[in-house]
Image (spheres, rainbow, N blue to C red):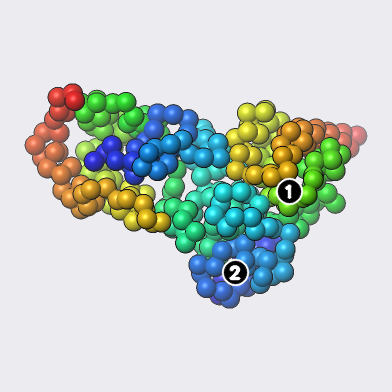
Amino acid sequence: MISLTINGRLEQVDLPPDTPLLWALRDHLGLTGTKFGCGAALCGACTVHVDGEAVRSCSAPIGLMDGKKVVTIEGLASSVGRELHPVQEAWIEEDVVQCGYCHSGQIMSAAALLAQVPRPTDADIDGAMGGNICRCGTYQRIRAGIHKAAEIAAGSANRVQGAATT
Amino acid sequence: MLRDPRCMNCHTVTDFPRQGDDRHRHIMNVLRGDDNHGVPGQRCSTCHQGVNQVNGVPGAPKWGLAPLSMGWEGLDDHQLADAIKDPSRNGHRTLAQIQEHMAHDALVSWAWEPGAGRRSPQISQAELGRLVQEWIDTGAVSPDSR
């Protein structure tokens, strides 16, 4: 039995330890926001957060997840105490999405980047997002969305800081 | 032996790792990062876990690049031996620790269980450890450049 926290909730998973985390999430726990794209860590559609880092869940065996803290696209906003994560807000504002299939993974990778680099450069974005593929070619909108998300997050931080000092 | 792609693909002097026997640049713009384990948003551990995966993604404990000081690309035999012996470049290791690293380190050991049909080095890790010990016992001489 493997115990891990998923979107803030402790889950007990009784699956063979070599089961990819992706299938534990989708088939066992019904969290279908994380997508299967390639099954070989080549597209990024399956990206989740494990202990704060972006991880391709198709290539992460559940047996290595014991005791870990996992966040999926379903729990991203609540993980930062918001209705929508700044990346999600930015994705809406910038109209980033076309078919949408890759975007749960894109958003998770972008969120992982912004958690460590609040004001990423284009080079930072290239490095973080190079493993997330978009067949619709929304890359320029993804880049704009990440810059917008950084602004949104900074604006929120300023509002909180302002409230704390008044 | 040390120039085998299973070793050299992570002992690069570039800001990226290499892949395959042809040593092409690692796909998907994977980068070294400040700590040799990737950049924010795409760490080595984003794709590589502690064991090989059935889908072909290789894995081993502490997957990542060797530091730039341990980059071996472009070095001749003499320079390579010097680099391995130099504590300022080899992670402050003694020769005994170098032998231990090559003979037993879990990440080094991956080269002999690389998975997915990848080729292993021509000699075994045990033989590598024996040869390194023999080199140490005979004075750890840096050979003539080749």
**Vertical order, A2 against A140 (above or below):** below
Q: Which residue is mark 1?
A: A103
Depth check: A98 or B15 in front? A98
The residue that mark 2 highlights is A3
Residue pictured at 44% horizontal, 52% vertical: B58
Q: Residue A34: x, y in percent? A: 69, 58
How far from the left and from the top, in percent, is residue B88? Answer: 32, 28
The image quadrant where one finds the C terminus of chain B is top left
Q: Relative to A41, does residue B95 appear above or below in the rendering?
A: above
Dot 1 alpha-carbon crowd within 10 angstroms: few under 14, some 14 to 19, many 20 or more: many
Three-letter amino acid code at the position of disc 1: His
Name the amino acid, label 2: Ser
Is residue A7 positioned above or below B87 on the image?
Answer: below
Residue neighbourhood size for the residue with mark 2, other residues' Cα within 10 Å, grouped as few (<14), some (14–19), many (≥20)? some
Mark 1 or mark 2: whose residue is earlier in sequence: 2
Viewport quadrant of the N terminus of chain B: top left
Q: CA distance from mark 1 to mark 2?
A: 28 Å
Q: The disc numbered 2 marks a residue on which chain?
A: A
Identify which residue is drawn at 84% across, 40% down. A95
Question: Which residue lies at the image location 66% right of the left edge and 52% below the top edge?
Answer: A45
Question: Whole-percent x and y of residue A65?
Answer: 56, 62
A147 sits left or right of A27 in the view: right
